[in-house]
Amino acid sequence: MSGAVERRRPPTAQQFVLAELRRAITSGELRPGAPIRQDALAARLDVSRVPLREALKALEAEGLVVHRIHRGYFVAELSLADLEEIYRIRQLLETEAVRKAAVRMPDGTITALERIQREVEAAAGAGDVTAMAAANRRFHFTLIEASGMPRLVRLVATLWDATDAYRSLYYTEAPHRKQAVREHRAVISALVEGDEEAAVRWLDEHRAHAVAALREVLDLPPAPERAGF
């Protein structure tokens, strides 16, 4: 978490720690299954153990970390079955959202998607996994939010949160970044042409390719422990 204490802190120490831990997990800096070294982390972020414990409890409630008796906190891991279930639920919900969005298509949605896609492509070309993961999420949620279904959007966001760490690992490979770029472009083209079915089909392929690659992530050996955690 290099440079973490240099960024502007949120109003409270707990919010600061919560934001830093969430960023480290969702960016892939802390890998699934990695231990969270509380003493070292508190010292590194210059906070007491109290806000750290509260932040960890909040992340545990979100499903991003797990507590193991006598062992401490670890970044949550997903089984293959968990991962496939999450992506299957995403497919059902996001398909409904995209169909609604394609019918409504609020003014400026395509323009926003094209602008964000340029950000995705810039990050992909630079190999900036964190920036690409963030831009990728903005791309998808710009489309999903165009459905005008805020409750559905919140459900989808919860599912995305559960797999953010894996998504960042997926983007570490250049071929995966290039494939995501191609699929995003195809989705935009389909929407411009008013082809709802093609947009849904491309998004289905987009998710399927991610799941196939993430299966391999689940088979990776444990990552070496990082200094400071």
Image (cartoon, rainbow, N blue to C red):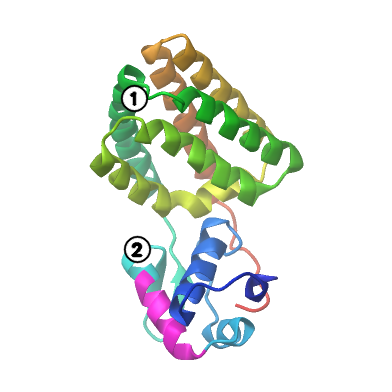
Residue segment shown in magenta: 48-58
In the image, which disc is placed on residue 101? 1
Question: Is residue 31 left or right of 81 when viewed as pictured?
Answer: right
- Precedes in sequence: disc 2 or disc 1: 2
SS at badge 1: helix
Q: Is residue 127 visible?
A: yes
Query: Principal SS element in the magenta part?
Result: helix
Q: Residue furthest right?
A: 126
- Residue at (37, 13) in percent of width and height: 197
Is 132 located above or below residue 103 in the figure? below
Amino acid type at mark 2: Glu
Residue 51 among magenta residues = yes
Drawn side of residue 229 relative to residue 90, left or right: right
Quarter of the picture containing the N terminus is: bottom right
From this view, report whether residue 97 is shown above or below residue 99: below
For the C terminus, which image quadrant?
A: bottom right
Residue 79 visible in this rendered orientation of the protein: no
Q: Nearer the viewer, mark 2 or mark 1?
A: 1
Residue at numbered disc 2: 62
Q: Residue at x 61, y 87 (%)?
A: 43
- 20, above or below 167, in the image: below
Relative image position of residue 27 (x, y in whole percent): 57, 56
